[in-house]
Amino acid sequence: MNYVQINRSHYLGKGGERECYVHPNDNTKVIKIMYLKGKHNFQNELEEEYYKFLDKKNVDFSHITKCFSWIETNKGKGLVFERIENYDKTRIETLSYYSKYTILDENVGKELLAELKDYVFKNSILFVDVSLSNIFCQKISKNKYRLIIFDGLGGRRKGIKFWFYLKSETFTKYKIKKQWKKFLSNYSYERSLKQIREEGQN
């Protein structure tokens, strides 16, 4: 297993369990490292297993980040993923950010959601942690965007449910439909908060 030294200059952000760093030897990749020392859900291990499952199915990775391999660092063992960037190298933001500040035209937003839904259902992608903060809104040209899920895939923890996700197509499809409804609810809620804030300022 390769080894790299990382420092605060490589830091990008953190989620509930992991910190994310730019790979010091390859800025097209990121390293996700567990920072919680107590009880956690072993998200790296879970995602590695889920990505291996997707690789065997030869799924399309156009709307999820690619997962590569483990790497040792001075902050512990990390999992290497594809780094998502805008075409013009401007700061990439999440769908939550775009929704909060109403950056996207409503019709454009609907088209992006429809495209993501088609992808998720066609490829049977388990997007379980359906927070808008787990999706990048990537600029792929001046006025064109693509939604890419970079976190929250596979499951929340290993266990019997995760095993069923990998073994039962029926159970997987049920879960995908259930989580997509939750995702749309989250999206509508964030947009409604924006409208409430705007009305309060008038």
Image (cartoon, rainbow, N blue to C red):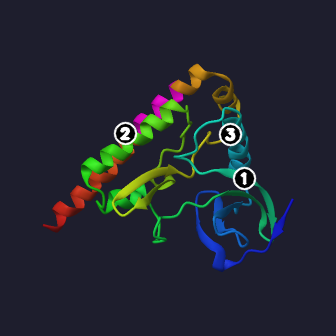
**Residue 52 seen anywhere in this rendered image of the structure:** yes
Q: Nearer the viewer, residue 23 or 131?
A: 23
Q: Which residue is mark 2?
A: 114
Few, some or many residues within 10 Å of mark 1 (<14, 14–19, 20+): some
Region in magenta: 174-182
User: In the rendered view of the protein, which quadrant contains the N terminus?
Assistant: bottom right
Identify the residue at horizontal 67%, vertical 32% (top origin): 57
Residue 183 appears in which quarter of the rendering? top left
Q: Which residue is mark 1?
A: 68
Q: Earlier in the sequence, mark 3 or mark 1?
A: 3
Q: Which residue is mark 3?
A: 50
Drawn side of residue 107 relative to residue 159, left or right: left
Q: Determine the secondary structure under disc 3.
A: helix
* Residue 43 on image: x %, y %: 68, 49
Whether 90 is drawn above or below 102: the answer is: below
Few, some or many residues within 10 Å of mark 2 (<14, 14–19, 20+): few
Residue 201 appears in which quarter of the rendering? bottom left
**From mark 2 to mark 3, how far is it between C-alphas?**
24 Å
Q: Are marks 3 and 1 in contact (CB under 8 Å)?
A: no
Q: Determine the secondary structure under disc 2.
A: helix
Mark 2 or 3, which is nearer the eye? 2
* Residue 161 on image: x %, y %: 65, 30
Drawn side of residue 3 relative to residue 197, left or right: right
Q: Earlier in the sequence, mark 2 or mark 3?
A: 3
* Residue 33 on image: x %, y %: 71, 61
Identify the residue at horizontal 65%, vertical 63% (top origin): 30
What's the residue type where badge 1 is placed?
Phe
**From mark 2 to mark 1, how far is it between C-alphas?**
28 Å
Whether 179 is drawn above or below 63: the answer is: above
